[in-house]
Amino acid sequence: MKLRPNTTLKAVADILGCEYIGNPAHIISGFNEIHLVEKGDVTFTDVAKYYEKALTSAATTIIISYRIFKTT
């Protein structure tokens, strides 16, 4: 899903009520599944086995559930 207009990392984090690491002005242009992401997109994983796939995807922003780190 492409965003029109683009938004920022801080704006997305504020909407989701989550913490972020990085530049608050980082531009986000869309949201997508790991296997469909493009540069500028956000992807999400809450399953440890997909963590590496998310990191090596084309996504420029990754949302990771804290639960992954608590269970590994």
Image: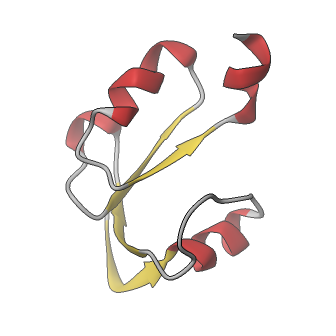
State the residue in front, 2 or 66: 66
Residue 27: percent from left, percent from top = 39, 77
Residue 32: percent from left, percent from top = 34, 50
Residue extending farthest front: 22
Residue 38: percent from left, percent from top = 20, 54
How was the colour assigned to the protein in this rendering? secondary structure
Is residue 18 depicted above or below 46 in this figure?
Answer: below
Q: Quadrant of the C terminus?
A: top right
Q: Quadrant of the N terminus?
A: bottom left
> Which residue: 28% across, 32% down?
56
> Which residue: 31% across, 50% down?
59
Please tell me in which quadrant of the rendered image residue 52 appears: top left
Is residue 65 depicted above or below 59 in this figure?
Answer: above
In the picture, measured across the screen, residue 31 lies left or right of residue 65, that is: left
In the picture, measured across the screen, residue 7 lies left or right of residue 22, that is: left
State the residue in front, 30 or 55: 55
> Which residue: 48% across, 12% down?
49
In the picture, measured across the screen, residue 11 lies left or right of residue 33, that is: right
Q: How many marks?
A: 0
> Which residue: 67% across, 22% down?
68
